[in-house]
Each structure stands twice: as C-alpha cells, then as structure tokens.
Image (cartoon, grey):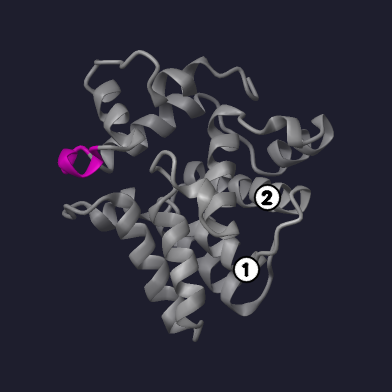
Amino acid sequence: MPDGTTARAASDLMRDHQPDLLLNAACRTFVFASLLGHSRALRFDPELLFIAALFLRIGITRLYAESQQRFEVDSADAAAQFLRGHGRTWEDIGQVWDAIALHTTPGIAQHKAPLTALLCAAVETDLTGAHCECFSPTAQAHVLAAYPREAGFKFKFLHAMALGQVHRPQSTVGTANADVLAFYTHRLNAGGFCERLLASTWPY
C-alpha cells in the first residue's frame, strides 16, 4: 500500500469518516486495481489510485445526508478538495475525479485513462468477482485475508449504499444505484446490479 505523506493523510481522514465495511472494500479495490494494472502493463500513479479508492464511497456517508448530487460526484469533489490541499496538479486531480465519478456509469470507464478504467474494473472484481481470471487463487486469498469481507457483506453493502442515496433518488438514474434503491424498496430488477451481486459466488 502507498505509504507517502499524502496517502497516510488520506487513510487517516477516511478512517475517521467511514466504517470498516467501506474501508476494507476500498483497500481490496485498490489492490485488485493495482494487480489488474500490472497484468495489463498499464502505467498509473499508485498513490492517486489509492486515494481514488479510499474516497470512492465517502459520498454515501452521513457527511452528505443533505446532498442532492450523485454520490459519485460528492466523492469525487471530496477527493479533489483533499488533493488540492496536498499540492497535487490539476491533471492529477482530474484523473482522480474522473475515476471516482465514472465508476458506476456503464460502458464509459473502460474507454478512459488507466486510473479510471482500473478503478471501475476493480470495483467489479470486489463486488461480483469479475476479472478473477486475472488473479491466482493465492492472490485472491491473500487480499481477502488482509481486507476481509465481513459476514453478510452483500446485504450490508447494499443497505449502506441505499441509505446514502434514498434521500436523492433522482440522482441514481442511469446507474447501478437506481437498482440499489429498487432493491431497497423490495423491487428487484431482473438482471440488475443487485441480482448479479447477490447471485455471485465470489468469494462466498
């Protein structure tokens, strides 16, 4: 894991505002994204990727209980503000903003810069096991041992995502989050994100 001053500051800040459920998911996402990047011989800044993963879901926390923006935009804005405070360039900030803001938008992230493409792919890995063929069983086991998915993770994750957005349903249109809110109100969409997450057998 990146251990520079900025990375440590981001870790401390996110630890103060996110539960272990989200923090462990963020760390798993970073590791999977890094492994995917190396397997595809892509160039990326590990510290920026780490910060993008940490801030990925800060927008669903109580800090944004009154927001009407998409949670992804709240998360991206928070990461941008943090990076500005640590002297990162506008280019760096733009990469992280795009990666966070686009990670739930189907069909776009994979065509963007490596940071965006890798973050989105790693989110898919962490939640549904997509791209697992890129990792050895040993690597998967190590990641899950270091940053475990706690018992009942799938339902707890969906619950956290829904609670963070139920006050702004209009912001979820066109993303997987619309399916999360439908599931939360007991209207499971056939073939939707929630069905894929719950049907996934990865890791158990």
Q: Residue furthest front?
A: 111
Q: Which residue is mark 1?
A: 47
Q: Secondary structure at mark 1?
A: helix
Q: Tell me whether circle 1 and circle 2 mark residues in contact (CB < 8 Å).
A: no
Residue 3 quadrant: bottom right
| Residue type marked 2 | Val
Q: Which residue is mark 2?
A: 31
| Residue type marked 1 | Glu
Q: Is residue 178 among the parts visible in the rendering? A: yes
Q: Is residue 67 above or below residue 96?
A: above
On the image, the x and y values in percent for residue 101 come to: 38, 55
Q: Secondary structure at mark 2?
A: helix
| Residue displayed at 59% across by 33% down | 149
Q: Quadrant of the C terminus?
A: top right
On the image, the x and y values in percent for residue 163 come to: 27, 38
For marks 1 and 2, the one nearer the N-term is 2
| Residue displayed at 32% across by 48% down | 60
Q: Quadrant of the N terminus?
A: bottom right
Give the CA separation, mark 1 to mark 2. Answer: 12 Å
